[in-house]
Image (cartoon, rainbow, N blue to C red):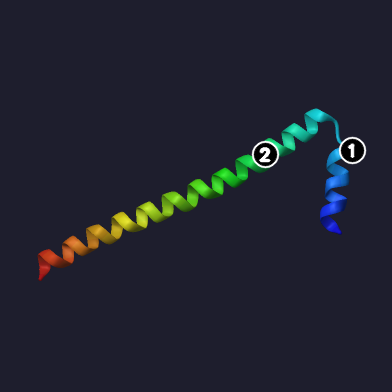
Amino acid sequence: MIFSKLLYFYHKQPLSSRMTWSISVLSIILLVLIAVSAYRIALEESQEVIDKQMEEMA
């Protein structure tokens, strides 16, 4: 129901507005994906550093 209303509202907008909204939403999705990837990489690297430090202490 809500999706159909949003879709109707989206198609009523001029092409320039639709393009702006589409690019904005896509950019936000990509930003979230990049942030999650960066977090996972940083977490893995920090775990490796901690593991090496623990091995050196042992």
Q: Is residue 12 left or right of residue 36?
A: right
Q: Is residue 34 left or right of residue 51?
A: right
Secondary structure of the residue carrying tag 2 is helix
Q: Amino acid at mark 2?
A: Ser
Question: Label 2 neighbourhood size at 10 Å, few (<14), some (14-19), many (20+)?
Answer: few
Residue found at x 85% / y 31%:
14
Q: Which mark is residue 28?
A: none
Q: Residue furthest bottom?
A: 58
Residue underneath mark 2: 24
Quarter of the rendering occupied by the N terminus:
bottom right
Q: How much space separates mark 2 and mark 1, taking CA atoms?
A: 18 Å
- Residue 22 is situated, as x and y percent measured from the top left of the image, at 71, 38
Residue found at x 87% / y 51%:
5
> Does residue 19 sit above or below 47 in this rendering?
above
Q: Is residue 52 left or right of residue 14?
A: left
> Does residue 11 sit above or below 48 in this rendering?
above
Q: Amino acid at mark 1?
A: Lys
- Residue 55 is situated, as x and y percent measured from the top left of the image, at 13, 66
Residue underneath mark 1: 12
First in residue order: circle 2 vs circle 1: 1
- Residue 29 is situated, as x and y percent measured from the top left of the image, at 60, 46
Q: Is residue 21 left or right of residue 39?
A: right
Secondary structure of the residue carrying tag 1 is helix
Q: Which residue occupies the foreground of this view, 4 or 42?
A: 4
Residue found at x 64% / y 41%:
26
Question: Label 1 neighbourhood size at 10 Å, few (<14), some (14-19), many (20+)?
Answer: few
> Residue 53 sits in which quadrant?
bottom left
Name the front one of labels 2 and 1. Answer: 1
Quarter of the rendering occupied by the C terminus:
bottom left
Q: Residue furthest top?
A: 16
